[in-house]
Image (tube, grey):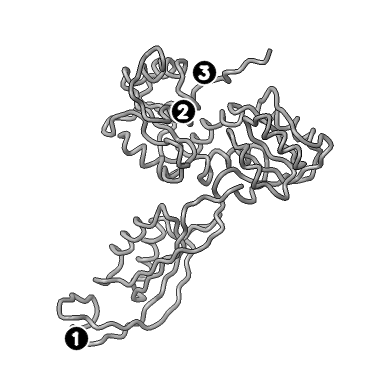
Amino acid sequence: MKLKELLNILNEIAPFFLQEEDDNSGLQFGDLESDTGNILLALDLTKEVVKEAEELNINTIITHHPVIFKPVKSIEKSKNEALFYAITNGINLVSFHTNFDIAESGLNDYFINLLNLKKIKPILESKEKVYKIVTYVPEEYALRVRNAMFESGAGHIGNYDECSFSSIGTGTFRPLPNANPFIGTQNIRASVKEVKIEAILRERNLQKVLSNLRKAHPYEEPAIDVYEILFEKNYGIGAIGTVEQEQNVQDFIAFFKKKTHTNYVRYIGDLNAKISKIAVCTGSCSSLFEYLTDLHLFITGDIGYHTALAMKERGLNILDVEHFETEKFFKEALFERLKNYIDIESIKLSSVEKSPFYLI
């Protein structure tokens, strides 16, 4: 498989345009025509990870955190040894960051499922637009056109796909002298029994659906309407879920530490709180507390002193988890998605990563 094909797969799993404005997900270094070979999944590109890649005969490394955040003027070995060695050894580098945080079945969804929470919605919905596409087709071609739309990504709503609505009516048209009509005669108005097909689609699939719909449609000039609609999306930044039964916050924290293999956490709020509705945002999402209402606990990391004080003043219950401890599951989360596209024997999960902090 070529690197450009891997990027297309990743873009299907979590479109790169979903990433936050200040992010740099995507190709960091590589040859699009090169063979991906064995692929290593890692949270960060470190010297240890590059050494591991060499030992495992890795051609491509996919990290969660981008190797390059800002424009680079030079690459000096002593300042960025990991990047220097990866480039000089010809290892393809790809980062899969906030787009995978935001996407359906991405890192936040994996994490909330790990905690046995039933997801309700994201903390903040994705900014991706949602459209309704409508077309009109002769009855005998309705199935072909509908299937082309579904196969291109239309008709996906929540936990359902191939969703559409059809109604029957009469279409009229008059082919002009330069027309090459599929039905009808030039300069004579035609009336045709047609099926109106409607389906929902996301921005990422719009051009593909339009292209394949036109290929499947028998008309020279098919009538196609596209409307932007307001739609409650089940993907975005963070995730909100519920536990099966209300429980004491200290019992949940003990469960959290055991389930995630986390050695320590910091807590802000009422130690006697009863919780059932919980929000999570892997990594560093402390600024999101401004959007939290009707919630019993928020789990995130990298909370600064003044933010913690503001959270406490508002009476919020917050579990501050080290950045690494929530995002270390990136490897498993992406592996679960990639195994549907790629031979799992070629995918390796880094085993050398650890937090940069020691508890003393």
| Residue 22, position as x, y percentages in the image | 46, 38
Q: Which quadrant of the structure image shows residue 219?
A: bottom left
| Residue 154, position as x, y percentages in the image | 43, 59
Instruction: Identify the residue shown where x is 70% and y is 27%.
Output: 265
**Secondary structure of the residue carrying numbered label 2:** strand
Q: Is residue 45 left or right of residue 1?
A: right
Mark 3: amino acid: Val
Instruction: Identify the residue shown where x is 70% and y is 49%.
Output: 293
Residue that numbered label 2 is attached to: 41
Farthest residue in the bottom direction? 188
Q: Which quadrant of the structure image shows residue 10?
A: top left
Disc 2 residue crowd, few under 14, some 14–19, many 20+, Cα 10 Å: many
Mark 2: amino acid: Leu
The N terminus appears in which quarter of the rendering? top left
| Residue 258, position as x, y percentages in the image | 70, 28
Q: Is residue 334 left or right of residue 275?
A: left
Farthest residue in the left direction? 178
- Measured along the vertical axis of the image, is residue 215 above or below residue 81? below
Farthest residue in the right direction? 272
**Secondary structure of the residue carrying numbered label 1:** loop
Q: Nearer the viewer, residue 251 or 267?
A: 267
Mark 1: amino acid: Asn
Per the rendering, the mark at residue 352 is 3
Residue that numbered label 1 is attached to: 187
* Mark 3 vs mark 1, CA separation in Å: 74 Å
- Measured along the vertical axis of the image, is residue 74 above or below residue 28? above
Identify the mark nearer the N-term, 2 or 1. 2
Identify the mark nearer the N-term, 3 or 1. 1
Instruction: Identify the residue shown where x is 63% and y is 31%.
Output: 301
